[in-house]
Image: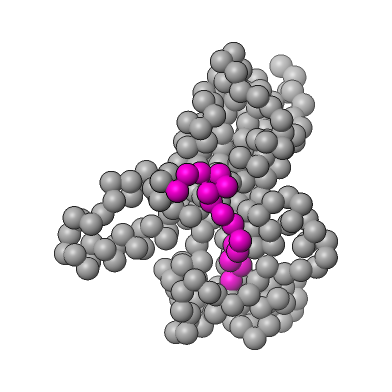
Amino acid sequence: MSKRRVVVTGLGIVSPVGSSIDEAWKNITAGNSGIGPITHFDPANFSTKIAGEVRGFNVEDYLSAKEARRMDPFIHYGLGASIQAVKDSGFEVTEENAPRIGVMVGAGIGGLYSIENTSLLIAEHNGPKKVSPFFVPGSIINMISGNLSIMYGLKGPNLAIVTACTTATHNIGHAARIIQHGDADVMVAGGAEHATTPLGMGGFCAARALSTRNDDPERASRPWDKDRDGFVLSDGAGVVV
């Protein structure tokens, strides 16, 4: 059986350089960096004090405040980018085509922010009495795909491959194969992450994996430089249709 041709028809992004395709592209082509000092926690005792934070993203552009409270930020980013991509593609979901439309959006680490804060709550209150009933569904990696399929009524393949830093690449690649082999006609695919938390930063600092160019954040990420000293942890999401 010959493989079907696969094309990209929609794009979505939430990133340190912008939370829309137009904004991100303008900043990238202008050479503007999204790396800067960490602002959402005090990194004074961390060897690395810089990261790629998402700034100016309003989750209520995509979800109600009530819905957003039940989800980790990585899900916010993933849904935001996914909704952008769906709108950009222009496809409409119908009762007839819904079984042929699927989702594959994953994360390398997932709900680290929620896990970290919920662990502190359990320690503080000596038990789970303050734990949200939405903690588990609001932090597990497959819930970008799950929530998006619920929002749009998508009934095709629904997965979330997890392969650390190559997660989005594998989700996009496998989604393309699903279309090539006739198991779906449309796939929403990509990845998301929110790992610039004390726990995430602490783990990579302990591994000595991060750049410590704290005085030069815009030029800290230099993977092909002979004087490179590590990578820069960043948040965001990228999704294609």
- Left or right: 182, with 23 as reference point: left
Residue 10 place in picture, x, y as percent: 72, 37
Disc tally is: 0
Main SS of the magenta part reads: loop
Instruction: Determine if residue 171 is in view.
Output: no
- Residue 18, by quadrant, is bottom right
The magenta stretch is 51-65
Asked if residue 60 is among those painted magenta in the image, a careful observer would answer yes
- Choose between 192 and 4: the one closer to the eye: 192
Decide if residue 42 is in sight here: yes
Identify which residue is drawn at 64% across, 58% down.
15
Q: Quadrant of the C terminus?
A: top right
Picture residue at 56% right of the left edge, 37% below the top: 104
Residue 123 percent location from the top left of the image: 22, 66
Query: Within the image, what quadrant is residue 17 found in?
Result: bottom right
- Residue at image position (56%, 54%) is 58
Q: How is the image coloured?
A: one colour
Asked if the magenta segment contains residue 209, the reply would be no
- Of 199 and 208, nearer the camera is 199
Q: Quadrant of the N terminus?
A: top right
| Residue sitting at the far top | 96
The x and y percentages for residue 173 are: 66, 39
Return the residue found at the far left: 126
Q: Which residue is drawn at 29% across and 51% down?
A: 132
The x and y percentages for residue 75 are 49, 48
